Amino acid sequence: MSPITASRALRGERAVTPVLVERVQGAAKRLGYVPDPAARALASRRSNHVAVLIPLLSNQLFVELLESVQRTLRTAGFQTLIGVTHYDQDEEEQLLGEQLAHRPSGLLVTGFERSEETRRLIASSGVPCVHMMETSRASGVHCVGFSQQDAGHAVAAHLLEGGARRIAFVGAQLDSRVMKRAEGYRRCLRGAGCYDPALEWLHPAPSSMALGADMLARIMSGPQPPQAIFFCNDDMAQGALLEAMRRGIRVPEQVAIAGFNDLPGSSQMVPPLTSLRTPRGEVGAAAASMLVALMRGRPVQDTCIELDYELVVRASTSGARTG
C-alpha cells in the first residue's frame, strides 16, 4: 500500500474502499497514531480545516446552521475553524486574516455584507468560498440561502390577509438580511396602498426578548397603535408577547404579532407565535456539501441554491381584528 493511499484511508475518502479504510484506521488506532495536521498542511499547502464565519453563537439560528455545517464537513473528513464576527466588519476582516494563516481548504461565510478588504482577502486567497443565508446570481459566486425579501413580503402579506391595514415592522441589528426583510414588507404594503413609514421601528441594538418587550410598549402607547406587528426575529416577538400579557393587551384581538425564523419556544408561547420558518439547517448542509465538492475539484452544477421557507400560522395572528 502506498503512503498516499494510507493517507487517504486515514481521512476516510470515498476513493478508498471501506474495507481498506477500516484496516488502515484500525492499525492506526492500535499503534496510537495521531495525524499531524501541521505537517499535512505543509505538504499539501492546505489543511483539512474549513474556516466558518458566523455573526453570533447566542442566536439559535446560527447554532443550528453551524451544527449542520459541522456534521456534513466531519463526514467528509474536514474540521471546522469557527469565527464569530458579532456583525462587525472590522472583526470579520481580522478573523479571516487569522484563519487564512492556518491554510484552510475552504471558507463558509454568512451573507454578502463585508468590507472591501475582506472581499479582497477572499478573492486573493484562492480558497473555495461558499456564502450562506443569502443568494446571488453574480458570476463566480457560490451561495446557498433563500430570498430574505420574498420571505419578508410573505409575512406582511399574511398580516394583510388577516384584515390588518396598519402594520408595523420592528427591526433590530439592522444587518443586510433584516433590511431585506424590511424591503419585502415595504414592497407588500406599497402594493396594497397602505405603507406608512411612521410604522417602521428600526433599532441598531442586537435582537433580544427585552428589546421586543420595550418596542411593544412604545408602539402600543401611541395615539393610533397598529393592528399588527411584524418583528424581524422571533426572540423580539416572544418578548413582545410576554409584555402584551403583562399589560393586558389581547393578542391577536387588539394587535396581531408575527415573528421570523420560527425559533425554539415560539410554538409554546401564549398565544403560540406565527412565524416564518427559515431553512437554516438545510442551508448549512447544502452549503457545506457544495464546498466539499469545490475543495475536491468536482463540478458544481448550480452555483446558487435557493431553498424554500415556510410560513407557520399560529394563534398570535389567527383571528386578528379587522377594524
Image (cartoon, helix red, strand yellow):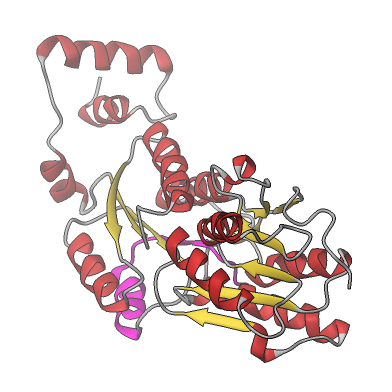
Tell me how many marks there are. 0
Q: Quadrant of the N terminus?
A: top left
Q: Is residue 43 above or below residue 195?
A: above
Q: Quadrant of the C terminus?
A: bottom right
Decide which of 119, 226 is in the foreground and name it: 226
Q: Is residue 118 above or below residue 318?
A: below
Task: Please report the residue visible at 60 percent of the width from the left and 56 percent of the height from the top.
Answer: 241
For the record, the magenta segment spans: 116-138
Task: Using the rendered view, name the quadrant where residue 79 is placed.
Answer: top left
**Is residue 61 visible to us here?**
yes
Q: Residue furthest bottom?
A: 197
Whole-percent x, y for residue 141 in the image: 52, 69
Residue 36 is left or right of residue 270, and the answer is: left
Q: Is residue 22 above or below residue 296?
A: above
Task: Using the rendered view, name the quadrant where residue 252 is placed.
Answer: bottom right
Q: Is residue 113 above or below residue 304?
A: below
Residue 80 is left or right of residue 237, and the answer is: left
Whole-percent x, y for residue 225 in the image: 70, 78
Residue 45 is left or right of residue 19, and the answer is: left
Whole-percent x, y for residue 176 in the image: 51, 76
Task: Please report the residue visible at 26 percent of the width from the left and 74 percent of the height from the top.
Answer: 93
Decide which of 56, 119 is in the foreground and name it: 56
Q: Residue furthest front?
A: 248
Decide which of 306, 3 is in the foreground and name it: 306
Task: Please report the residue visible at 26 percent of the width from the left and 67 percent of the height from the top.
Answer: 96
**Is residue 139 visible to us here?**
no
Residue 41 is a magenta residue: no
